[in-house]
Image (cartoon, grey):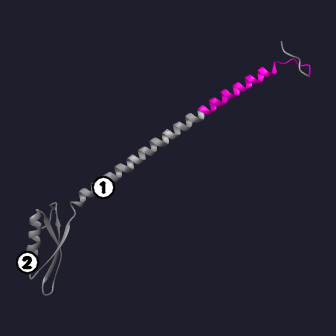
Amino acid sequence: MGKVLDGGVKGCQLPHTRSLIIQIAHIVNLVIVTIVIIISVKQITLFTIEDMYMKTLKTLALASATALSLLSFGSFAQSVSVTDSTLDGAESQIAAMAHQTGSQYRITGASSNNFVRMTAEINSAPSHGLKN
C-alpha cells in the first residue's frame, strides 16, 4: 500500500504519479501542437489557393487585355497625308490608297495655299458612313 507522508496523511507513490503527470502533459502538448499544425496547414493551404486563384485571374486579365488590344490594333485607322494641286487630285490619291488595301477612308482635314494638303484616316475594317 501507500507510504505515510510527513503529515501523517497516507498518499500514493510519488515517483509513479509524477511520471503519469509528465506523460499526460506530453500527450496534451502533442495534441495542442497537432491542432496548431492542422490549423496552420489549413490556413497556408487556404492562402496558397487564394494566391493561386488571384494570380490566375491576374494572368487571364492581362492575357485578355493583350489579346483585345492586339485585335483592336488591327482595326485602328491609319492616318495618311497627301499633297496635290487640286482638292479632287488629293482626294483621288487617298481613294487610291484605300482601294489598294480594300479599305474605306474619311477625310479629316484639308488646306490650300499654292497646293492642297489633305489628311485622312484609312480604316482596315469597312465602316458605315465613310467615303469610298
Residue extending farthest to the bottom is 114
Q: Say which amino acid is labelled 1.
A: Thr
Seen in the picture, residue 113 relative to 23 is either above or below; the reply is below
Which is nearer the N-term, disc 2 or disc 1?
1
Marks 2 and 1, how far apart at CA: 40 Å
Which label number is shown at residue 66?
1
Q: Nearer the viewer, mark 2 or mark 1?
A: 1
- Is residue 123 a member of the stretch shown in magenta? no
Residue 73 image point, x, y percent? 24, 60
Q: Which residues are magenta?
A: 7-34
- Element at label 2: helix
Q: In the visual, does 130 lie left or right of 3?
A: left
Residue that appears at 13% across and 63% down: 103
Q: Please provide percent x and percent y for residue 70.
A: 26, 57
The amino acid at mark 2 is Gly
Which residue is painted at 21% across and 60% down in the image? 74
Magenta part mainly helix, strand or loop? helix
Which residue in the structure is indicated by mark 2?
Answer: 89
Percent position (x, y) of residue 50?
A: 45, 43
Task: Tell me if residue 15 is in the magenta stretch.
Answer: yes
